[in-house]
Image (spheres, helix red, strand yellow):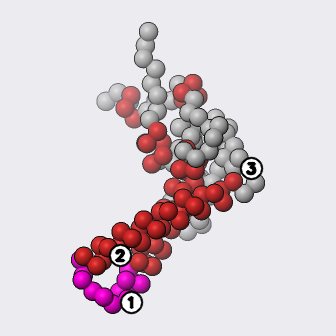
């Protein structure tokens, strides 16, 4: 009996793939795009509806908030250790600049984590990704 190939969860999260089939892209645009991040209504591969109910992605704000808090604490401690400065303007400039640059990352991955981990009823179905060849399987 041949061993079934399953697509791993972490690469699917990093690449922002559908939590059900781990093949289709959740987003139609790149993370840093002039036109903003456009999310597909349904998975292009398996047809799963991403927005489970109206206002579903409002819950992703809590995940994004946790990201921002972790980023701010890490940056503040790092700035203190590296510069030793007590100037509040230095901290304000560094913290706001980096949080502004990471805002698209926080938006995208808060939604991806909400779909993959925090939504009951969405589970990976390896049957949906059977016909897909992953990067590990491509012959050289």
Q: Which residues are magenta?
A: 82-94
Q: Name which residue lies at 50% across and 68% down.
A: 103
Quadrant of the frame with the C terminus: top left
Specify the quadrant that holds the N terminus.
top left
Picture layout, residue 132 above or below residue 60: above
Q: Which residue is mark 1?
A: 89
Mark toward the start of the polypeptide (2 vs 3): 3
Which numbered disc, 1 or 3, marks the residue that appears first in the sequence? 3
Q: Position of residue 73 (x, y in %)?
A: 39, 70
Tell me the residue at 63%/54% (across/down).
Answer: 39
Asked whether the viewer can see residue 99, the reply is yes
Determine which of the numbered discs, if any, sits on residue 53 in the image: 3
Q: Which residue is label 2 attached to?
A: 76
Residue 65 falls left or right of residue 39:
left
Q: Assign a secondary structure to mark 3.
A: loop
Residue 5, image x, y percentages: 45, 24
Q: Position of residue 13 (x, y in %)?
A: 48, 46
Query: From this viewpoint, is residue 104 visible?
Result: no
Snapshot quadrant of residue 124: top right
Identity of the residue drawn at 41% across and 77% down: 95
Q: Relative to 64, say whether 54 is above or below.
A: above
Q: CA distance from mark 1 to mark 2?
A: 12 Å
Q: Is residue 47 magenta?
A: no
On screen, residue 18 versus residue 85, left or right, reads: right
Pointer 2 local density, CA inside 10 Å: few below 14, some 14–19, many at least 20: some
* Label 2 – label 3 distance at C-alpha: 38 Å
Relative to the observer, which residue lies in front, 110 or 131? 110
Tags 2 and 3 in contact by the CB under 8 Å rule?
no
| Circle 1: element type | helix
């Amino acid at each position: 009996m041949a061993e079934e190939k399953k697509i791993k969860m972490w690469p699917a999260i990093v690449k922002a793939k559908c939590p059900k089939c781990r093949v289709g892209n959740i987003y139609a645009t790149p993370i840093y795009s002039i036109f903003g991040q456009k999310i597909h209504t349904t998975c292009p591969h398996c047809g799963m509806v991403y927005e489970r109910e109206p206002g579903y992605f409002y819950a992703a704000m809590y995940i994004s908030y946790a990201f921002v808090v972790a980023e701010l604490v890490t940056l503040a401690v790092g700035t203190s250790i590296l510069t030793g400065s007590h100037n509040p303007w230095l901290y304000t400039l560094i913290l706001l600049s980096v949080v502004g640059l990471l805002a698209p990352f926080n938006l995208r991955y808060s939604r991806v984590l909400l779909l993959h981990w925090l939504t009951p009823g969405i589970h990976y179905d390896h049957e949906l990704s059977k016909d897909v060849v992953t990067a590990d399987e491509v012959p050289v």
